[in-house]
Image (cartoon, rainbow, N blue to C red):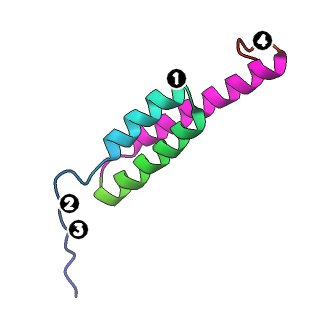
Amino acid sequence: MTAQYPPPAASAGSDRSTLWGVLGIVVGLLCCGILGVVFGFLSIRDARRFGKSPVLGWVAVVLSVVNIVAGASLYASGNYPIG
């Protein structure tokens, strides 16, 4: 029978899952939804790598996709303020 050992502890400063998640939410809502999706997936990847909850990354992805869909529907209806 083999013993199960926990994964090695990450060095300080290498876990950026919270940073990516917050950046994804802010950027995804304010300006660029595509970058928000990218940052959200980076947050999910780092959260899984370091054993943290990926909820912040998923929130960033969902809000960014909502922003993309809302912007596309406003643009298609002609109500988009730019252009």
Residue 71: x %, y % from top left:
69, 23
Q: Is residue 71 magenta?
A: yes
Residue indicated by mark 2: 10
Q: Which amino acid is tagged 3?
A: Pro
Quote the CA–CA distance across marks 1 and 2: 32 Å
Give the quadrant of residue 68.
Answer: top right
Using the image, determine if residue 71 lies above or below residue 37.
above
Left/right of residue 10 with respect to residue 24 in the rendered view: left
Q: Residue at x 31, y 47 (%)?
A: 16
Give the quadrant of residue 21.
Answer: top left
Q: Which amino acid is tagged 1?
A: Leu
Residue indicated by mark 1: 30
Q: Which amino acid is tagged 4?
A: Asn
Q: Secondary structure at mark 3?
A: loop
Question: Who comes first in sequence, dot 4 or dot 2?
Answer: 2
Residue indicated by mark 3: 7
The disc placed on residue 79 is 4
Dominant SS type (magenta):
helix
Quote the CA–CA distance across marks 3 and 2: 9 Å
Q: Residue furthest front?
A: 83
- Residue mark closest to the camera, 4 vs 3: 4
The magenta-colored residue range is 52-77
Residue 29: x %, y % from top left:
52, 25
